[in-house]
């Protein structure tokens, strides 16, 4: 068994130290430290050891096995320069000063050992972190012997830096995360003079991108959004990603109101610009809320900006709004309404009401449109304009749409069987968000199987906006519905963004003239009436060319019906004929309208 002895020669001892230092990657030093009075040779930048006695510390330091140290810690030095001096100078001046203060404190307090960490700059410009443990022995008053052991902790420091970075940054975009944002806001608002501005950015319809193109494409959109924000904001503020498709821009010092408005405009334009992901053009937009922060609660600033963003989204998206205190009341009401909407869906309070669609020539009922109506448990009716936008925003439109479609199909089977009206169509509206669900077509197929309704008896009404986010995917889904045998109708035609080139590619069988054109037929200004007649005439001519049926909605006056009939419209619906009614009332309405042949059947 080998055993190390201590009777080696000085040469053998030196060789052992060289090997030990090289293999252990450590640095050993020993120093004799003397307390000396300050004189003209004393460096004025060197801290005093004892101000009352006006003394400083004089170091006589030597490195143990210095050449072995240079093998793993190649700090810069020049010929004829003592290595211990080069070692000290490899630290930046601030760290040299801090290290000496640490030693002074240890000697003043008469502690037997102390510890510190610092960096050394190497010859190639890179930096190494060292951990230094120092043992202190007082030989006589004013004279000490110090022994230091330094080890390389660079790997540990790099890991700590990465972990610290990860706790403060979003891994996908490299932006600040929620934690860093909240800490920054808290520091800014802790200052009595702190005034900040926060932009809360939320991408519109981002879920559709994930659902239709996959999460990889969604990640690419988020990365591109982060880059757009960086370009617009620059060094002016702190950009953060809170999670999902939510971003913020924090301006530490609020500039003028015109500059805030200018940045809001620039962000809106940048984020609403088309984006190409995997050779596929995507139309994007974002809703932005802006809030000004006063010294106070950190959460208030973020909540206010978020509230303003939701109001901007509720007003049609793709824009920005500044926070107004009145929005708080609106937000509370909205929160309460959302909770009530969830309960209503659970308890089946929202039911389909049906409005007949008639032939303008014969007056016969050819179809009925299912419309969502909500009667609360207290008996109060809430108009669709109050709850449908919230359902769209929260995603509740999806279960709501499924429930209405299933109920409408069941009711249509009853009317077609009991009343003998085998040609009766049922029209059901489909929201853009519901249409973009990956399982939308299978869901329609399943409901038709469950209810037994022939696919040709179902007409799905869709708006032109379904083609905005991705035209090719939307057209493919429409063709899948056509293959089921379902009829498709384009709702609110003339108010959207559908170009004629795309309209010719859509497998739709019908168009609906928007009610705004119909109501304009009764306008007091003859010129305005003439202009809208021209629009309706153009839509009818286009439909005839494409062999599409046309329904005019929102007919409320006899004069409107007569004018539409004269222009060539075939079908219409509106309060002039019948208001939306529950299923049992529509059954009586259809029975009264049935022909003798239908009654006999």
Image (cartoon, grey):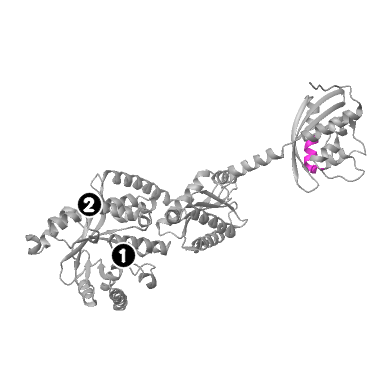
Give the number of callouts: 2
CB atoms at circles 1 and 2 under 8 Å apart?
A: no
The image position of residue 143, as x and y in percent, is: 88, 26
- Give the CA distance from mark 1 to mark 2: 25 Å
Q: For the residue labelled by badge 2, is the local secondary structure a helix, a strand or a loop?
A: helix
Q: Residue beneath label 1, please?
A: 491
Residue 456's spot in the image, x, y percent?
Answer: 24, 61
Closer to the camera in the image, 524 or 311: 311
Q: Which residue is mark 2?
A: 451
Q: Which residues are magenta?
A: 90-100
> Vertical placement of 544 versus 93: above or below?
below
Image height check: is 140 above or below 284? above
Residue at 32% from the left image edge and 45% from the top image edge: 340
Which is nearer the eye, 572 or 560?
Answer: 572
* Residue 465 seen by the camera: no
The stretch drawn in magenta includes residue 353: no
Q: Nearer the viewer, mark 1 or mark 2?
A: 2
Mark 2 crowdedness (10 Å alpha carbons): few <14, some 14-19, many ≥20: some
Q: Is residue 65 visible?
A: yes
Q: Percent x, y for residue 223?
A: 54, 55
Residue 449 in the figure: left or right of residue 213: left
Q: Quadrant of residue 164?
A: top right
Is the stretch drawn in magenta largely helix, strand or loop?
helix
Question: What residue is at 79 percent from the left and 45 percent from the top?
Answer: 122
């Amino acid at each position: 068994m080998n055993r190390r002895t201590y009777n080696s020669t000085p040469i053998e001892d030196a060789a052992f130290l060289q090997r030990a230092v090289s293999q252990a990657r450590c640095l050993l030093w020993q120093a004799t430290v003397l307390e000396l009075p300050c004189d003209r040779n004393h460096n004025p930048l060197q801290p005093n050891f004892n101000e009352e006695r006006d003394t400083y510390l004089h170091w006589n330091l030597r490195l143990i096995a210095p050449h072995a140290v240079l093998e793993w810690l190649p700090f810069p030095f020049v010929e004829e320069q003592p290595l211990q001096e080069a070692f000290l100078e490899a630290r930046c001046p601030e760290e040299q000063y801090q290290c000496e203060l640490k030693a002074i404190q240890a000697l003043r307090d008469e502690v037997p050992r102390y510890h510190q960490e610092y960096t050394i700059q190497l010859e190639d410009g890179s930096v190494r972190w060292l951990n230094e443990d120092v043992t202190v022995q007082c030989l006589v008053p004013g004279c000490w012997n110090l022994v230091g052991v330094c080890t390389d902790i660079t790997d540990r420091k790099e890991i700590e830096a990465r972990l610290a970075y990860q706790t403060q940054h979003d891994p996908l975009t490299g932006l600040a995360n929620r934690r860093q944002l909240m800490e920054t806001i808290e520091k800014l608002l802790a200052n009595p003079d702190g005034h900040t501005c926060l932009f809360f950015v939320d991408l519109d319809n981002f879920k559709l991108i994930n659902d239709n193109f996959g999460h990889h494409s969604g990640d690419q959109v988020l990365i591109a959004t982060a880059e757009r924000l960086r370009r617009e904001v620059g060094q002016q503020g702190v950009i953060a990603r809170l999670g999902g498709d939510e971003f913020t821009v924090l301006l530490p010092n609020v500039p003028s109101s015109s500059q805030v408005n200018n940045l809001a405009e620039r962000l809106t334009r940048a984020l609403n610009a088309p984006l190409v992901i995997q050779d596929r053009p995507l139309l994007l937009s974002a809703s932005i809320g802006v809030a000004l922060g006063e010294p106070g609660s950190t959460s208030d600033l973020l909540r206010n900006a978020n509230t303003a963003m939701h109001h901007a989204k509720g007003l049609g998206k793709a824009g920005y709004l500044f926070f107004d205190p009145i929005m708080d009341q609106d937000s509370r009401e909205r929160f309460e309404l959302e909770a009530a909407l969830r309960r209503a869906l659970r308890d089946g309070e929202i039911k389909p009401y049906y409005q007949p669609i008639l032939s303008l020539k014969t007056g016969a009922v050819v179809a009925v449109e299912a419309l969502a109506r909500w009667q609360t448990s207290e008996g109060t009716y809430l108009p669709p304009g109050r709850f449908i936008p919230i359902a769209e925003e929260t995603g509740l439109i999806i279960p709501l749409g499924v429930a209405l479609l299933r109920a409408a199909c069941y009711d249509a089977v009853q009317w077609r069987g009991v009343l003998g009206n085998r040609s009766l169509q049922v029209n059901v509206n489909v929201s853009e968000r519901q249409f973009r669900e990956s399982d939308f077509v299978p869901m329609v197929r399943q409901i038709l199987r469950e209810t037994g309704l022939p696919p040709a008896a179902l007409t799905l009404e869709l708006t032109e906006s379904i083609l905005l986010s991705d035209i090719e995917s939307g057209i493919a889904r429409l063709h899948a519905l056509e293959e089921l045998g379902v009829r498709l109708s384009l709702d609110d035609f003339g108010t959207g963004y559908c170009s004629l080139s795309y309209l010719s590619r859509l497998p739709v069988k019908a168009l609906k003239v928007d009610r705004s054109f119909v109501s304009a037929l009764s306008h007091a200004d003859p010129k305005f009436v003439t202009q809208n007649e021209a629009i309706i005439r153009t839509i009818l001519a286009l439909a005839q060319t494409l062999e599409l049926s046309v329904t005019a909605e929102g007919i409320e006056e006899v004069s409107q019906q007569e004018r539409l009939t004269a222009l060539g419209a075939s079908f219409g619906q509106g309060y002039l004929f019948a208001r939306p009614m529950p299923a049992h009332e529509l059954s009586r309405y259809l029975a009264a309208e049935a022909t003798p042949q239908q009654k006999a059947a």
